[in-house]
Image (spheres, rainbow, N blue to C red):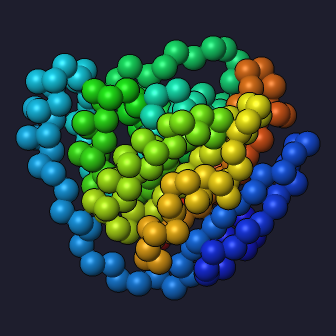
Amino acid sequence: MAGLREAGLVGAALALAGGLVFVLWSFIQTKKAQPGRGKLPDPDRQRAAAERRGAPALPEPQEAGTQVLVLGLEGAGKTSLLHCFATGSLEQDVSPTQGFNAISINKEELHIEFLEIGGVEKLRDYWQMYLKKARVLVFVVDSADPAHFPLAKTHLHRLLAADPYLPLVLLANKQDVAGARGVADLYEALSLGTVGDARKLCVLGTQVQKGRAETNVGVQDARELIIEMMNNSHA
C-alpha cells in the first residue's frame, strides 16, 4: 500500500466500495534495534489462575512472534472480521467466540496465524499471556457502542503497557451502524496519542455485512495492512 512507510501521524482518506475509510497511521521507516519487551506475567501461573476462575481451556501459545493476536470486548465483531480476512466475505451468521478462534492466511511465502481470544470477562485473563507470542496486535472496538469505550481503553492500555513495541492495528468496527463514531473519535476516546513513538500504529474503520462483500468497507485494507506489517517485522 502506497505511503505506508511515511513516518509520523497522518490522516488519509481512501475511496473504497462506495464509502470513505479514514486511516490514522504511524509507521517508523527506519528500523531500530528494539530493547527487550516489557516483562509479562508468567504464562503458566496466569493460565492456572484463569482456569480456577472457570475460563475455558485455550491452546498453548505458539512460538514467539508467529501470530496476529486479535482481541477486543465481546460483541465488537472480531469473529466476523476474521471470516472476511479468510474468505473475503461473510456468508452466514457467526456465534460469539466462547474460547478461541484461529485462522491461517498464506500470502506468497508468508504464513500468518490469526488467533482470536473471546472478549467476555473470564477470557480477558488470558490476553496478556499471549502477547509475547504475537507479532501484531489487532484490537477491535464496536464504534457504535461508546458506553464501552472506557472499558476498552482500560484493557487496551494494559496490553500496550506490557509491551511498548508491539505493533497495533485498532479496528473501529461497525461503521455502518447508526451512531458509529469515526476513527478520529476513537483515537481520542482511547487516548492513542499516549502510546509512544516507538510503536507502529494504525486506526482503521471497518464494517461487515453478511452476503455483501462489496459493502464490507475497510476489511480488505485492514487485511493487507496486517500482512504488510507482518512482512516488515519478518524481514
Residue drawn at the location 37% of the way across and 26% of the way down? 120
Residue drawn at the location 11% of the way across and 49% of the way down? 42
Which is nearer the eye, 202 or 90?
202
On the image, the x and y values in percent for residue 154 come to 38, 49
Residue drawn at the location 51% of the way across and 63% of the way down? 192
Q: Is residue 118 visible?
A: yes
On the image, the x and y values in percent for residue 225 come to 63, 57
On the image, the x and y values in percent for residue 56 come to 25, 21
Q: Is residue 114 visible?
A: no
Residue drawn at the location 77% of the way across and 20% of the way down? 211
Answer with the quarter of the image where residue 179 lies.
Answer: top right
Q: Is residue 130 above or below residue 136?
A: above
Which is nearer the eye, 63 or 137?
137
Q: Is residue 34 above or below residue 231?
A: below
Extreme residue in the front direction: 147
On the image, the x and y values in percent for residue 44 come to 10, 40
Answer with the quarter of the image where residue 51 lies.
Answer: top left
Q: Is residue 150 above or below residue 98?
A: below
Extreme residue in the right direction: 18
Instruction: Report whether 200 appears left or right of 98.
Output: right
Q: Is residue 150 above or below residue 103?
A: below
Instruction: Report whether 130 appears left or right of 171.
Output: left
Quarter of the N terminus within the rendering:
bottom right
